[in-house]
Amino acid sequence: MKKKLLVAIVAVIAVAVVLLFFFVPHEKRVYFVSAEGILHYPADRGELVFEKTLLSENASQKLYKVVFESRGEKVYGLLRMPKTSGTHAAAIVLAGA
């Protein structure tokens, strides 16, 4: 009898978890990374408002502190930009993303 009750309780919990997964609204992802490793955002995401403060500069590059808002929270980062024009490699690190 106890075994049947335990199986019934586990089954009810499993059904509840499945129902919650399907009926609780999930946050829509607004970005994706392609198979080539390229980060894509929708074109209609709105204007990005940010602060950029120059921290240091040398002959080849500038280092900035950047601050922008995402989902009501401030996000802080560092932006290193070369002074030369052309195509350059980039890295995006999203700690805790």
Image: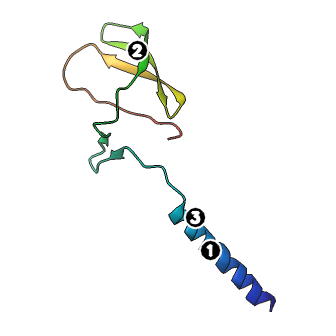
Q: Quadrant of the N terminus?
A: bottom right
Q: Amino acid at mark 2?
A: Leu
Percent x, y of residue 22:
51, 65
Q: Quadrant of residue 88?
A: top left
> What element does badge 2 sit on?
strand
The residue that appears at 72% across and 79% down in the rendered structure is: 9
Mark in the foreground, 1 or 3: 3
**Pointer 3 or 2: first along the chain:** 3
The residue that appears at 51% across and 36% down in the rendered structure is: 95
Q: Nearer the viewer, residue 57 or 44?
A: 44
Residue carrying label 3: 20
> What element does badge 1 sit on?
helix
Residue carrying label 2: 63
Q: Amino acid at mark 3?
A: Leu
Q: Are marks 2 and 1 in contact (CB under 8 Å)?
A: no
For the rendered model, the colour scheme is rainbow
Q: Residues within 10 Å of mark 1 (few under 14, many from 20)?
A: few
The disc at residue 14 is 1
Q: Nearer the viewer, residue 59 or 5?
A: 5
Q: Quadrant of residue 37?
A: top left
Vertical side of 62 occupied by 90: above or below: below
Q: Are marks 1 and 3 in contact (CB under 8 Å)?
A: no
